[in-house]
Image: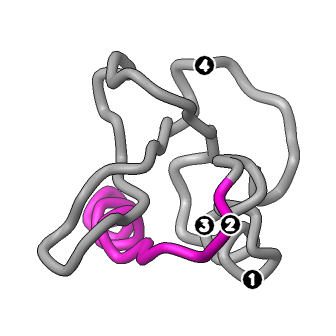
């Protein structure tokens, strides 16, 4: 979704529309089993930044408005360390 490069499903992180403390948000789906439309991106902060800058979360999840993506960024930052 961010860098648009191909990879195997196991190398990617699936994200779905879920809920956060302050309302609906894009959340990581670590098991890949949450029902609903999902989108995939590489497990890197760089790929996340590209997707966020291009507003790809809204398009890929077919939403009318942007949602908070803080949970996805926090997870990716924790994976980098």
For the record, the magenta segment spans: 63-81
Measure the alpha-carbon separation of dots 3 and 4.
Answer: 16 Å
Measure the alpha-carbon separation of dots 2 and 4.
Answer: 27 Å
Of 4 and 62, the residue lying toward us: 62
Above-or-below relation of 35 to 18: above
Measure the alpha-carbon separation of dots 2 and 1.
Answer: 17 Å
Instruction: Identify the residue shown where x is 71% and y is 49%.
Output: 62
The residue wearing badge 3 is 48
Q: Is residue 53 magenta?
A: no
The residue wearing badge 4 is 9
Above-or-below relation of 43 to 66: above
Sequence-earlier tag: 3 or 4:
4
State the image coordinates of residue 70 (x, y, percent, origin top left): 35, 76
Circles 1 and 4: CB atoms closer than 8 Å: no
Sequence-earlier tag: 2 or 1:
1
Residue count near mark 3 (Cα–Cα under 10 Å), binned few <14, some 14–19, many ≥20: many
Q: Is residue 72 magenta?
A: yes
Q: How is the image coloured?
A: one colour
Sequence-earlier tag: 2 or 4:
4
Instruction: Identify the residue shown where x is 29% and y is 22%.
Output: 31
Above-or-below relation of 14 to 51: above
Sequence-earlier tag: 3 or 1:
3
Measure the alpha-carbon separation of dots 1 and 4.
Answer: 23 Å
Badge 1 marks a residue whose secondary structure is helix
Measure the alpha-carbon separation of dots 3 and 2.
Answer: 20 Å
Of 21 and 52, the residue lying toward us: 21
The residue wearing badge 2 is 64
Residue at the farthest front position: 64
Q: Which mark lies nearer to you, 2 or 1?
A: 2
Residue count near mark 4 (Cα–Cα under 10 Å), binned few <14, some 14–19, many ≥20: few
The residue wearing badge 1 is 53
């Amino acid at each position: 979704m961010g860098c648009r490069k191909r990879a195997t499903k196991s190398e990617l992180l699936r994200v779905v529309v879920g809920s956060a403390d302050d309302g609906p948000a894009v959340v990581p789906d670590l098991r890949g089993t949450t029902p609903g439309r999902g989108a995939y991106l590489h497990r890197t902060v760089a790929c996340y930044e590209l997707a966020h800058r291009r507003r790809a979360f809204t398009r890929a999840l077919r939403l009318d408005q942007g949602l908070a993506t803080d949970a996805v960024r926090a997870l990716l930052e924790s994976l980098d360390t």
